[in-house]
Amino acid sequence: MSELFISRLRELTVLVYALSVLLYFIDFLHRNRKANQVAFWLLAFVWLLQTVFLIVYMLRVGRFPVLTVIEGLYFYVWVLITLSLGINRWLKVDFIVFFTNVIGFGFMVMHTFTPLEFGPAGMSDHLISELLLIHITFAIMSYGAFAVSFVFSCLYLIQYDLLKRKKWGTILIRIADLSMLEKMAYILNCIGVPLLLLSLILGTQWAYLKIPDVSWYDAKIVGSFIVLAVYSIFLYLKVKKGLQGRTLAMWNVASFLIVLINFFVFGKLSGFHLWYSFILPLRYGGFSS
């Protein structure tokens, strides 16, 4: 297939994704089950196309696609769609797919229509190791778990507010009960925290072996450990202190905002994560649009 055809196919994927999110929004407002079903199958189609693109790209470059911002964004969106489809299939929680894929669609647009890729051209080949690949993959998967956990907490706060103001209606009925929302946010954080911990351990080991003069006070390194700390505190408050309800949900929402700050702000300031730098733009291949 030609590069032009692949590019147009990816743009079509974005349009189908947009239509899916739009139909989920219609269902959110008017409880339209037909719109919900069509949106689900469109989203499943997007997931299928993304999976094919990932496999083809891995076969082309001979590695897992997470070493650049563009690759990382693409894999992150794939993780979000996979999680939302799985949760929708097994738990039947209304709105979780819609809110999760609002986040996913935003990242998909950033990936598809960014004119430049920021790649690891300044790094020699020997620095790209399996250790680095596993480190980045685990980090992205943990961020995916945190994103869906954030959505559950947002739904918890919406449901809590509706109950407190006694706003009875279809939205109140369709959102899962508070205990379910809180439980799922907790479970996803239980998955995300060890993944992030393993990622940081592997990343630290890789940096120690490959970049002896690395600054351990780098913004991205410090930011990543802050993310691990705030989510670890969440688990501590939940398990040891028995904290629950609105306060815990607000802590979880604030924690995900720190994740975004770490990714977008600290990642830009980092001198260590060269492949996430916005200083050395290159025309991109691979996941190009």
Image (cartoon, helix red, strand yellow):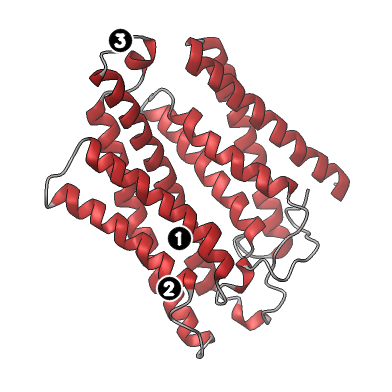
Name the quadrant containing residue 5: top right
Which sits in the foreground, 164 or 154? Answer: 164
Residue identifier under label 2? 202
Relative side of 241 to 202, left or right: left
Mark 3 element type: loop
Tag 1–tag 2 contact (CB < 8 Å): yes
Q: CA distance from mark 2 to mark 3?
A: 49 Å
In the displayed image of the protein, which residue is found farthest to the front? 165
Sooner in the amino-acid sequence: mark 1 or mark 2: 1
Would you place residue 111 above or below residue 58 in this image?
A: above
Q: Which mark is residue 168?
A: 3
Residue identifier under label 1? 138
Which sits in the foreground, 89 or 139? Answer: 139
| Residue 129 in view here | yes
Residue depicted at 64% across the width and 43% down the height: 108
Q: CA distance from mark 1 to mark 3?
A: 41 Å
Mark 2 element type: helix
Would you place residue 122 above or below residue 79 in this image?
A: below
Q: Which mark is residue 265?
A: none
Sooner in the amino-acid sequence: mark 2 or mark 3: 3
- The amino acid on which the numbered mark 1 sits, given as a three-letter code, is Phe
